[in-house]
Image (cartoon, rainbow, N blue to C red):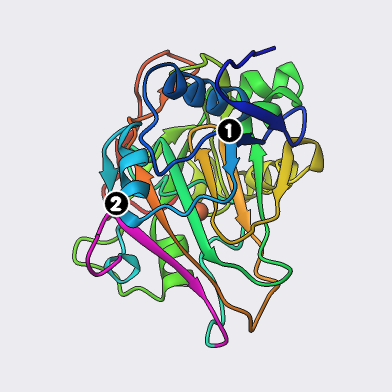
Amino acid sequence: MSHYRHLDVRKLTPTIGAEVHGIDLREEPRGEVLDELTRALHDNLVIFFRDQEVTFEQHMRVGRLFGNLQQHPIARARHPVHPELLVVHADENSKVVAGEDWHSDITCDVAPPMASMLHLKVVPPVGGDTMWASMYAALDALSPSMQAYLETLTAVHDGGKPYIGHYKAKVPEGGFPRSEHPVVTVHPATGRKVLFVNKGFTTHIKGMRRPESDALLDFLFHHIESPKFNCRFRWRANSIAFWDNRCTQHYAIFDYFPQVRTGHRVTISGAPPVSARSGTVESVARPLDVMAA
Ligand SMILES: [Fe+2]
């Protein structure tokens, strides 16, 4: 059980999620406060803040305390002045919104982001909640035999899967990013094992026949949806969610059409995940002309 001297950390569930009070993110967190923020993130996987009227600069400054900010692969999603900001917006013209299915962010990259921080400024009167799920808990709930088997596997994560569907993006020259990652990874800070496949990006298991791969991934995608592994956050204007992308998946619920929901996200760069099987980095960018098995 973690104790905090500076922050008031209120868990949403025993497994995942906590609201963090007693901090004003307009001021740069330093020293013990920053240490406690990091610990709150590692303990709870996603942390939430209320009533944070941060500017773009303050939002980006908090993000940079945890790593370099990266630009989203799809240019149209970037803020015109601050390309490190991803514009999150839906209104009466939105037919689909990005993120409305369980996923981790940008796992098509060899080095997926370590975290994302979303600040919403306008929210619907009701609806537009986001859910997060613990991929520690999802893995832990599987039998030892299944866990051991999954550790032997490698999966392909393809940017074309969401980017064509959600962003209607044209295929860039050279194609979308596509990478191979171990199915079970190890979180670099906590040392805990993580189930690292997601419906958003993962297309198939390397070396398996397609029906085998589809059946196994369908099982895992369904398994991670258990309410036992997740929390649901009700946004208010000026709420911030800060999630560890290495051990969670999230789902942005689009149930508020035609209301407006708008804000900005910063995405913090990460490192290639470490394989639970070997304890080393095995992730590689995948050649674009390799077809699925
Ligand atoms: Fe997302």
- Res. 110 visible in picture: no
Which residue is the site of mark 1? Answer: 22
Measuring 22% from the left and 66% from the top, which residue is drawn there?
81
Q: Nearer the viewer, residue 218 or 128?
A: 128
Q: Nearer the viewer, mark 1 or mark 2?
A: 1
Q: Nearer the viewer, residue 224 or 9?
A: 9
Residue 172: quarter of image? bottom left
Q: Is residue 69 above or below residue 252?
A: above
Measuring 44% from the left and 16% from the top, which residue is drawn there?
32
Amino acid type of disc 2? Answer: Glu
Residue 286 screen position, x and y as percent: 30, 44
At label 1, counting other C-alpha atoms closer than 10 Å, the crowd grade (few under 14, some 14-19, many 20 or more) is few
Residue 237: quarter of image? bottom right
Q: Nearer the viewer, residue 258 or 196?
A: 258
Residue 157 screen position, x and y as percent: 43, 47
* Element on which disc 1 rests: loop
Which residue is the site of mark 2? Answer: 57
Q: Is residue 164 above or below residue 157?
A: below
The answer to whether the beta carbon of the residue marked 1 is less than 8 Å from any atom of ligand 1 is no
At label 2, counting other C-alpha atoms closer than 10 Å, the crowd grade (few under 14, some 14-19, many 20 or more) is few
Measuring 62% from the left and 54% from the top, which residue is drawn there?
251
Q: Locate the N terminus and report the quarter of the image it occupies.
A: top right
* Element on which disc 2 rests: helix
Which residue is the extreme one toward the bottom? 93
Q: How many marks?
A: 2
Amino acid type of disc 1? Answer: Gly
Magenta part of the chain: 79-92
Residue 177 screen position, x and y as percent: 30, 52
Left or right side of 280 for 125 = right
The answer to whether the beta carbon of the residue marked 2 is less than 8 Å from any atom of ligand 1 is no
Residue 114 screen position, x and y as percent: 41, 35
Q: Is residue 139 above or below residue 32?
A: below
